[in-house]
Image (spheres, rainbow, N blue to C red):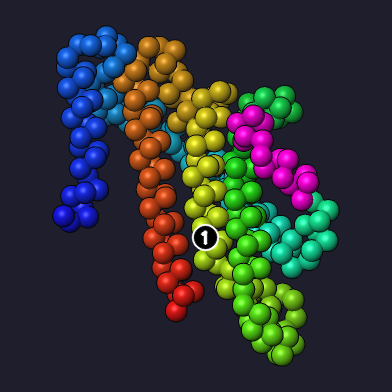
């Protein structure tokens, strides 16, 4: 069976089940809205500019927080892999913070920074940092010794060794961490917007819940899932290509 067919089979089955259940009247129509109403709400929120405004705010926070978390995670991971004392001194604190669910930091960050952009960007950065840091540590430590021997033979300074040897060789593992970090940060961001935000995809869903507009809530849920799926597919493709390059 072609991959395209298998890929769309399960979504079509879920859509058919959703439509049939909504049409059956088992649940009140105000709670389980039909797919047609969700599509209508999608068009409505887009035409009114609500959806585009919400997506713009959410993507901005994701871009800034994810970028910061990626850079910090990569820097820490490479440093911890190359210099053992860094890991020895920071590992306990690193492990404690990593094991705390990202969303648990929301109340504390709101107390310090309010409900503005800062706390949401920090939530994204935290969710991004740890998977990438761990992937960078494993990637650097997994580099074959002959790569490092070549760098030493050529007497490359540390910046050139990082740029020409360490980072390219560890890149496939780092991309795996980026993929995990992006998925976690996307979910954490939408959840944070549900709790406290003036604008954003999560805030749009929360406002829809308060106004009992379940069609708007379903629009937000669907877009959250589709965006997350799309981001994961892009990075999975990059991960596969880099893994083949590393194996070759």
Classified by dominant secondary structure, the portion drawn in magenta counts as helix
Give x and y (percent) for residue 128: 59, 47
| Residue 118 visible here | no
In the orientation shown, which residue stands out farthest toward the bottom? 153
Q: Secondary structure at mark 1?
A: helix
Above or below residue 34? Residue 54 is: below
In the orientation shown, which residue stands out farthest toward the top? 28
Residue at horizontal 78 percent and vertical 44 percent from the top = 93
Question: Residue 90 versus residue 119: which sits nearer the camera?
Answer: 90
Give x and y (percent) for residue 97: 71, 40
**Left or right of 221: which side holds 97?**
right
Q: Quadrant of residue 13?
A: top left
Q: Is residue 99 magenta?
A: yes
Give x and y (percent) for residue 178: 53, 54
Q: In which quadrant is the C terminus drawn?
A: bottom left
Residue at horizontal 64 percent and vertical 84 percent from the top = 146
Q: How many marks?
A: 1
Residue at horizontal 71 percent and vertical 27 percent from the top = 108
Q: Is residue 203 magenta?
A: no
Above or below residue 176? Residue 53 is: above
| Residue 39 visible here | yes
Above or below residue 206? Residue 112 is: below
**Left or right of 90: which side holds 76?**
left
Q: Quadrant of residue 133?
A: bottom right
Question: Residue 246 versus residue 74: which sits nearer the camera?
Answer: 246
Residue of label 1: 175
The crowd level at tag 1 (other Cα within 10 Å; few <14, some 14-19, many 20+) is: many
Give x and y (percent) for residue 75: 69, 60
**Left or right of 206: which side holds 84?**
right
Q: In which quadrant is the N terminus drawn?
A: bottom left
Residue at horizontal 53 percent and vertical 42 percent from the top = 184
What segment is highlighted magenta in the picture? 91-105
């Amino acid at each position: 069976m072609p991959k395209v067919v298998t890929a769309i089979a399960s979504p079509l089955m879920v859509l058919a089940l959703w439509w049939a259940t909504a049409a059956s009247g088992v649940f009140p129509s105000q709670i389980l809205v039909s797919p047609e109403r969700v599509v209508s709400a999608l068009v409505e929120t887009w035409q009114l500019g609500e959806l585009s405004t919400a997506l713009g705010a959410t993507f901005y926070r994701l871009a800034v927080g994810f970028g910061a978390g990626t850079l910090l995670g990569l820097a820490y991971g490479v440093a911890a892999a190359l210099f053992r004392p860094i890991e020895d001194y920071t590992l306990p604190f690193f492990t404690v913070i990593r094991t705390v669910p990202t969303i648990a930091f929301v109340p504390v960050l709101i107390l310090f920074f309010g409900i503005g952009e800062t706390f949401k960007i920090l939530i994204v950065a935290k969710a991004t940092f740890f998977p990438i840091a761990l992937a960078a540590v494993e990637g650097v430590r997994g580099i074959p010794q002959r790569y490092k021997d070549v760098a030493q033979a050529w007497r490359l300074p540390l910046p050139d060794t990082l740029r020409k040897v360490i980072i390219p060789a560890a890149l496939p593992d780092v991309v795996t961490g980026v993929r995990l970090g992006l998925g976690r940060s996307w979910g954490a961001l939408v959840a944070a917007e549900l709790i406290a935000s003036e604008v954003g995809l999560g805030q749009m869903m929360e406002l829809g819940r308060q106004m009992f507009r379940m069609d708007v809530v379903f629009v937000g849920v669907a877009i959250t899932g589709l965006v997350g799926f799309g981001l994961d597919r892009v990075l999975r493709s990059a991960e596969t290509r880099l893994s083949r390059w590393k194996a070759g």
